[in-house]
Image (tube, rainbow, N blue to C red):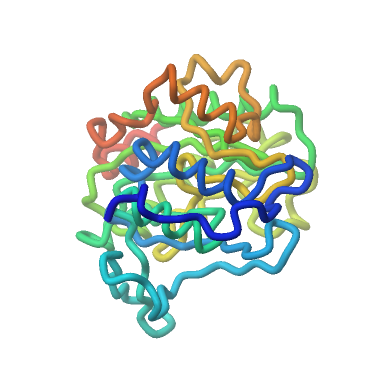
Amino acid sequence: MDPAEITTSNPDRIYYPAAGLTKGDVVGHYRTVAEVMVPHLRGRPLTLRRFPRGIDGQTWYQKEAGGKLPSWIRVETIPQRTTSDVRHVICDDAATLVYLANQAAIEYHIWSSTVDDLEHPDMVLIDIDPPGHVPAGELREIARLVRDVYTAAGLVPYVQATGGRGFHVVAPLEPSQTYDQVRDLAKTAAEVLVRHDPDRLTTAVRKNQRGDRVYLDVQRNGYTSTFVAPYSLRARPSAGVATPLDWHELGKAEPDGWTPKRMKDRLARKADPWAGLADHAASPARAMELLKKL
């Protein structure tokens, strides 16, 4: 299917009142980023966050694909551990991405494994999740600390401004261990960080145990858990975009600093910093060995 053949319905409907963005602008964003975004979606179960009336209206997270999709969109049945199986959309091409955007999908969240090997993640993630307002400079410092621990463990770190409040630090893995083992890897890395900076960082899952410390969230490494896909819009008033960064860009980066307009300008002059991520996959078993020595 040619994405150019997909017509945007209700293009003038306001989706982001504060930013003045319409549905047409949102669909246009996904047309713009499709070339760099689809490789990060391809083969991965997808969870959508849909907003038919814009971000101030009713919303829901959609896992089940439903029965009204065109036949050319890929759908795969994904086993669940505690519920019945779910038929997930798999976004393998630009046409699927644009079609979903036209169906009011604003946010796109992906698994860290693919349908070809569901039980074995090929990424590990620490989500830097601040409590309320924490200065961006402090969040950048924390991202660099995560980077340094990853590097000491033999991992190759990549950073993403989430389009929301924080940053993600991701490392590619050989898909050789289970979700539980990879989550333990992330937890061990986070615990190393907390041990070195306990007044500022925490791994406490319960909010009432965190105080004003920054939460290092490793729960996104679980089976069926997701994280926001690179280049996805976020449903926040500023219309931030989840943006993969080079590490040298972090010094001036804001978590929600890229809008659709800024992203269009960025992609006109810069390649995707995460394009070669899979080429640097490391052994999770070896990484755990090294972490235990830190």
Q: Is residue 294 above or below residue 29?
A: above
Q: Residue at x 69, y 59 (%)?
A: 206
Q: Where is the N terminus found, in terms of image quarters?
A: bottom left
Q: Position of residue 181 (x, y in %)?
A: 35, 55
Figure quadrant of the C terminus = top left
Q: Residue lying furthest bottom in this view?
A: 84
In front here: 218 or 11?
11
Which residue shows up at 61% across the image and 47% down it? 234
Q: Nearer the viewer, residue 207 or 255?
A: 255
Asked which quadrant contains residue 129, the reply is top right
Q: Where in the figure is residue 285, as x and y percent of width and height?
A: 27, 44
Task: Please determine whether, in this image, residue 280 is positioned above or below residue 219.
Answer: above
State left or right for residue 254 relative to residue 6.
Answer: right
**Front-most of residues 60 and 175:** 60
Q: How many marks?
A: 0
On screen, residue 203 versus residue 178, left or right, reads: right
Q: Is residue 218 left or right of residue 251?
A: left
- The location of residue 160, given as percent across then percent down, is 50, 34
> Toward the viewer: 86 or 147?
86
Percent coordinates x, y for residue 123 in the rendering: 35, 45
Residue visible at 60% across and 59% down in the picture = 10
Rendered position, 65 above or below 237:
below
Q: Residue at x 38, y 28 (%)?
A: 272
